[in-house]
Image (cartoon, rainbow, N blue to C red):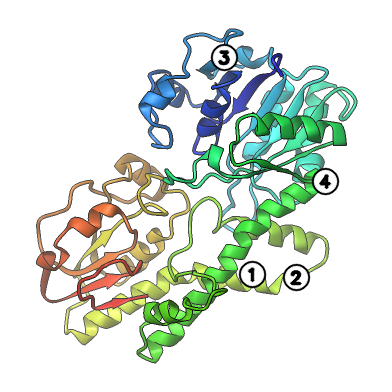
């Protein structure tokens, strides 16, 4: 495997940790079209906070050469002499919840321009079964002029990165692998097995690997939708949902899911990819889409519960001051992609309230660009009519939130992490 040279296409939450890991054993170029991202990485800094500065700097090199290490570039010429291309671009959905494969098409076009005989293109992006061979490979063939499984080959190894998780890092998560032929499957599996300490699982086909990935998060989505529905039911019955789940969790095979806002680049997106493909082949996926409807409604539900509590406490709704704690899609990471905290915020603003958003992790400029919302990174020292904790950042546990509430003010805990008395929670 000494002749392996790897180009990782896309240096975000998935691509950078993988490129860094490969660079401990191989000659790697990390390619990204965002020059600002390339500049910060070449300085040894990662704004996503997925790779520590000293870890990143330990593998960086200043130029693309044949030595082990990582060089980051936005110049396509720097990846033309490589033989493994690993594509790690995002796969979002559009405003109508339909899969948007544009990043995959664009990255496939880039790789096709430098593709050579014998090269292997591996996709890590989450997709519905068939995308790699039916959507991406034709792009590679058309632009390169090469023939699939004759001149070049494909692989698939779905990403399992959990943003902000410093325990389950890329090397410690078992990797599913697949190839476009049995022989290529073994080569792809061996490549990942050489750096993934948790081990690998070689799937029989690319479509099997694609399907395995998309159902992982669909399964979680459906289970969370179930407990979200339970939360709605138990709230009407004045029963503590978290106490119910704790009691039920004493049974050995009870699954420990909790209610909450389901956003992010995976769980809130992947079920739509599976649903899209199911409908294309003539099946209407009732459970998958029902779970999505429940989870997509939770932002509006949380906002309405907060407003009800304020009304009960005789708090005037119009122009009421509300503090939102957290706007990232999950705790202790700066990722704001597809965050459902925005649904809570927009719904509260529709009642005429004045909303202040405090998040020590999110970049204000990124939130402004994505959602048109203003955020602060320091806790405002004023009083509010209501405080809504939407994200379980560790910083929030250190604050005396009650001191920020006006008399009769509402403290609503979406995540169920506050030990002090709260006015309400999911």
Q: Position of residue 396 (x, y in %)?
A: 24, 57
In this view, 125 is above or below 71:
below
Say which quarter of the image contains residue 269.
bottom right
Q: What percent of the width, then of the height, locates residue 15?
A: 55, 33
Judge left or right: residue 15 versus residue 424: right
Of pointers 2 and 3, the one earlier in the residue sequence: 3
Write the residue at 17% across / 58% down. 399
Residue designated by label 4: 204
Disc 3 is placed on an element classified as loop
| Disc 2 versus disc 3: nearer the observer | 3
**CB atoms of marks 3 and 4 within 8 Å:** no
Judging by the rendered image, the residue that carries numbered circle 3 is 68
Residue picked out by circle 2: 284
> Do the numbered discs 4 and 1 sit on residues whose CB atoms are within 8 Å?
no
Q: Residue furthest bottom?
A: 237
Q: CA distance from mark 1 to mark 3?
A: 46 Å
Provide the secondary structure element on which disc 2 rests: loop
Provide the residue designation for mark 1.
289
Q: Position of residue 149 (x, y in %)?
A: 88, 30
Height in image: 161 above or below 83? below
Give the number of the mark in front: 1 or 3: 3
* Disc 1 from disc 2: Cα separation: 9 Å
Q: Which of pointers 1 and 2 lies earlier in the amino acid sequence?
A: 2
């Amino acid at each position: 495997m000494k002749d392996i040279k790897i180009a990782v296409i896309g240096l975000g939450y998935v691509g950078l940790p993988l490129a860094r890991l490969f660079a401990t054993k191989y000659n790697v170029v990390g390619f990204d079209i965002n020059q600002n991202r390339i500049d910060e990485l070449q300085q040894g800094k990662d704004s996503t906070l997925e790779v520590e500065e000293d870890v990143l700097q330990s593998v960086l090199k200043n130029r693309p050469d044949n030595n082990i290490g990582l060089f980051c570039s936005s110049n396509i010429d720097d990846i033309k002499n490589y033989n493994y291309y690993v594509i790690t671009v995002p796969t979002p959905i559009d405003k109508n919840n339909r899969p948007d494969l544009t990043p995959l098409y664009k990255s496939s076009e880039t790789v096709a321009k430098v593709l050579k005989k014998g090269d292997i293109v591996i996709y890590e992006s989450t997709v519905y079964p068939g995308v790699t061979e039916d959507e991406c490979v034709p792009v590679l063939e058309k632009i390169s002029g090469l023939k699939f499984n004759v001149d070049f080959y494909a692989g698939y190894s779905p990403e399992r990165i959990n943003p902000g998780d410093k325990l389950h890092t890329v090397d410690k998560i078992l990797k599913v692998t697949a190839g476009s032929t049995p022989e290529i499957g073994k080569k792809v599996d061996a490549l990942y097995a050489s750096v993934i300490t948790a081990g690998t699982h070689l799937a029989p086909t690319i479509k099997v690997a694609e399907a395995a990935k998309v159902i992982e998060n669909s399964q979680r989505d459906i289970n969370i939708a179930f407990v979200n529905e339970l939360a709605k039911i138990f709230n009407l019955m004045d029963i503590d949902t978290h106490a119910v789940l704790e009691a039920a969790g004493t049974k050995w095979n009870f699954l420990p899911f909790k209610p909450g806002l389901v956003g992010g680049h995976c769980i809130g997106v992947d079920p739509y990819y599976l649903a899209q493909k199911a409908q294309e082949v003539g099946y209407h996926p009732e459970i998958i889409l029902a779970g999505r409807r429940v989870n997509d409604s939770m932002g509006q539900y949380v906002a309405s519960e907060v407003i009800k509590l304020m009304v009960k406490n005789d708090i005037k709704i119009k122009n009421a001051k509300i503090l939102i704690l957290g706007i990232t899609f999950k705790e202790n990471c700066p990722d704001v992609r597809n965050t459902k905290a925005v649904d809570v915020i927009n719904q509260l603003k529709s009642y005429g309230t004045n909303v202040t958003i405090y998040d020590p992790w999110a970049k204000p400029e990124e939130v402004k660009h994505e959602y048109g919302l203003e955020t602060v990174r320091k806790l405002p020292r004023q009083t509010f009519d209501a405080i809504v904790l939407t994200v379980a950042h560790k910083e929030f546990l250190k604050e005396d939130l009650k001191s920020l509430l006006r008399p009769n003010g509402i403290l609503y805990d979406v995540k169920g992490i506050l030990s002090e008395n709260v006015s309400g929670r999911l």
